[in-house]
Amino acid sequence: MERKAVITGDIVNFTSLKPERREALVKDSKEMLHSLSPEQGHAAFFRGDSFQLLTADIGEALLKSIIIRCWFKKAEGAKQRSLLDAKVAIGFGGISYFGDSVLDADGEAFHLSGRTFDKMEDARLRIVVPDEGVNRQLTVIADLMDVIISGWTKSQAEVIYLLLENKTQQQMAAELGIAQSAVNNRIKLSNWKEIERTVNYISSIIK
């Protein structure tokens, strides 16, 4: 049975936005989500502000989850004290059935992701696999990652989002209208190197 990673999530602080802003955000976010998964039907929004995405492996799922969180954290219209964000649960396991889209699919990865997401309270990142011993380790690691990512400001989320689009610091500076030194400072303050090392470590232990 093929093993893949499934991201299940929703938008944090979505209801703080005005109705017309919510509608526009979901429309733009659907385009963003589909850009992360060019394969037909591998990404979808449902129940208004919830979404699901099928990816090849844990490393890819983690990076795409970070892109998604940055996308919402940098979104216009969010008040500084209630920045938008995303809550995501990543499940890695077998895929037993895939129909027209992720909303018409089944398998271990979907069950792990969906059930974990439903149990999440304050946490905004969870990673689960079929091995409970590994999951205990992943919960600790995810909590530490989440502390860093949840603390990112809108400006830090902007540069990490562009970094994950493989933009150079010069390109980021030009796009954001700031100095390259400011871009470099935002990347450092976001503790990106530590996040990147953690993503690589998780990828190395889950094959």
Image (cartoon, rainbow, N blue to C red):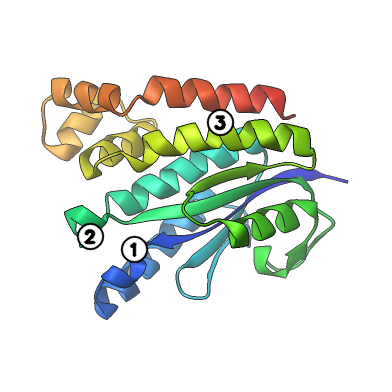
Residue at left offset 62%, top offset 27%? 202
The first of marks 2 and 3 along the sequence is 2
Find residue 100 and report its image quarter. bottom right
The answer to whether the residues at label 3 and label 1 have Cβ atoms under 8 Å apart is: no
Amino acid type of the residue that numbered disc 3 sits on in the rendered structure: Ile
Dot 2: what SS? Answer: loop
Between the residue at mark 3 and the residue at mark 1, the CA separation in whole angstroms equals: 24 Å
Percent from the top left, x then y, of residue 40? 62, 60
The residue singled out by tag 1 in the image is 13
The residue singled out by tag 3 in the image is 141
Residue at left offset 43%, top offset 21%? 194
Amino acid type of the residue that numbered disc 2 sits on in the rendered structure: Ala
Left or right of residue 44: residue 23:
left
Find residue 131 and report its image quarter. top right
The answer to whether residue 101 is above or below residue 62 is below
The answer to whether the residues at label 1 and label 2 have Cβ atoms under 8 Å apart is: yes
The answer to whether residue 126 is above or below residue 47 is above
The answer to whether residue 11 is above or below residue 190 is below
Q: Nearer the viewer, residue 174 or 193?
A: 193
The residue singled out by tag 2 in the image is 78
How many neighbours does mark 1 have within 10 angstroms: few (below 14), some (14-19), or many (20 or more)? some
Q: Which mark is residue 168?
A: none
User: Is residue 165 among the parts visible in the rendering?
Assistant: no
The answer to whether residue 91 is above or below residue 173 is below
Left or right of residue 78: residue 141:
right
User: Is residue 163 among the parts visible in the rendering?
Assistant: yes
Between the residue at mark 2 and the residue at mark 3, the CA separation in whole angstroms equals: 28 Å
Find residue 179 and report its image quarter. top left
Dot 1: what SS? Answer: loop
Q: Nearer the viewer, residue 190 or 183?
A: 190
Q: Nearer the viewer, residue 199 or 138?
A: 138
Percent from the top left, x then y, of residue 52? 58, 59
